[in-house]
Image: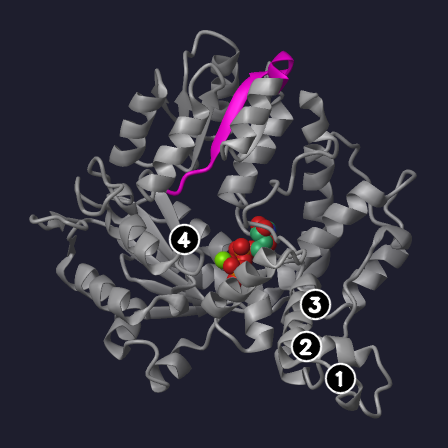
Amino acid sequence: MTRVLIIGALDGELGQAARIAQARGARLQQADGVAAGLARLRAEGADLALCDLAHDVGWLVEQLAAERIACPVIACGRNADAAAAVRAIRAGAKEFLPLPPDAELIAAMLQAVAGEPDAPVHRDPAMTALLERAAQLARSEASVLITGESGTGKEVLARHIHRSSRRAGGSFVALNCAALPESLLESELFGHEKGAFSGAVAARKGKFEQAEGGTLLLDEIGEMDPRLQAKLLRAIQEREIDRLGGTQPVKLDVRILAATNRDLMAEVMGGRFREDLFFRLNVVGLRIPPLRERPGDILALAEHFAGRFAAANGLPRRPLMPEALALLLAHPWPGNVRELENTLHRAVLLAQGAAIAAEAIELTPLRLERPAEVAVPARAAATPVSHPVSALVGRRVEEVERDLILETLTHCLGNRTRAAEILGISIRTLRNKLHEYRAQGAPVPVGPGQVGPMPMLPPGFYAQGG
Ligand SMILES: Nc1ncnc2c1ncn2[C@@H]1O[C@H](COP(=O)(O)OP(=O)(O)OP(=O)(O)O)[C@@H](O)[C@H]1O
Ligand SMILES: [Mg+2]
């Protein structure tokens, strides 16, 4: 369940927005101003904050950054307040929600934060069997390690396990261990006491405490550095945590799910992941097959996404024509369900006429297919195949590396996890490189789930403010 914090009075249009969010399954919290809102975020956390433009959104965003609290803030106000909206976005608000609120927009925002709210869509026998096993495991309290290539639906499965468990009434809290630098990750996980570091002006609960009575998903667990691995192991063993700067351990009742696209056993063998932690997390393992190994799911998912994106964009629901279906079935889907989802999103927006034709299906080129098959750099592949490397002679290593990284990232639709996997480097290294490139002024592709416009807002949304 998505936890939404409303900052502002509930008797006006913001209240309408709140009621729409609630009707769509969000759990609401409310605060009258930014200071009270910040206090609630420290104490309870939230997945999303909607803040009335009448309040100082910029101050809130700055304060969250200083206190290392990661929560997207959406500024809400009337279109007439264009200047205030621009100020809020400049100050770091993630989006502007025009009031009076539009129900579909709110649904799209909630979905962008929560990921897929429904049960996993499936039709292939392999996936049906996996989901049956998951349902059985869900009833236990065991830690589950979910593995699978990037975009196969690991987070979707984790949410499903939570919803099918005895903890369904509690919170589901997810933390992407690859998305944050080490110091931020530690404070996100364990929380901190007042004075723990220079920006820590007040105590704050971490994800562990936010998940009390519920489930905590540690996503991309393979990226966690050894020091935090040790701290995590202790938390799981002792069922208690220490906040940063804390003196009293805090008791916990949290079920842990972990997910990774790496071969974690190989990481253990290579000395990069603690064996004892591996066995704690991997009490039971669930491997989600890549989409190409469960072709029966392709059409079921395609139809599901076609319907969902039509609704999100206010378009009529249209069927897929047979040639379009044939294209989808023939593609090997290196980016798995996420790639299929993006393809259908484009198809829904591009399609003309009463059905979705093959012309609307734009598949990503297959030059890089699977990691094992990557023999030549992407740029070299465009030059005569007989001497791919000689075509690079005369160029600096740095330059070639940059082109390779950026092209791989484009190929992966901006998905860093997948790009790092193909490139054979850690996400951390990739992030640092991208940071460098951006500083040099290179255009760096942004993917789903990363900082940038939310994927599901209708075209022209940003123009509404002006
Ligand atoms: N069975 C499914 N039914 C509906 N949607 C799905 C399903 N599997 C995946 N998706 C969608 O595909 C996208 C990728 O899923 P998810 O984020 O769970 O994958 P992941 O394995 O965690 O990927 P990554 O390794 O990149 O984090 C999401 O938008 C999700 O909603
Ligand atoms: Mg994931």
Q: Is residue 281 left or right of residue 52?
A: left
What's the CA distance linking mark 3 and mark 4? Answer: 36 Å
Foreground tag (3 vs 1):
1
Q: Earlier in the sequence, mark 4 or mark 2?
A: 4
x then y, percent, for residue 211: 29, 45
Q: Amino acid at mark 3?
A: Glu
Of the pair 135 and 442, the residue shown nearer to us = 442
The image's mark for residue 392 is 1
Residue drawn at point x = 69 percent, y = 29 percent: 461
Looking at this rendering, what residue extends furthest in the top direction? 11
Q: Amino acid at mark 1?
A: Leu
Of the pair 129 and 390, the residue shown nearer to us = 390
The residue under label 3 is 407
What's the CA distance linking mark 3 and mark 1? Answer: 15 Å
Q: Is residue 258 left or right of residue 298?
A: left
User: Marks 2 and 1: in contact by CB < 8 Å?
Assistant: yes
Look at the image and give the residue range highlighted in magenta. Answer: 70-82
Where 205 sits versus 145, above or below? above
The residue under label 4 is 161
Residue drawn at point x = 44 percent, y = 25 percent: 57
Q: Earlier in the sequence, mark 3 or mark 4?
A: 4
Q: Amino acid at mark 4?
A: Ile
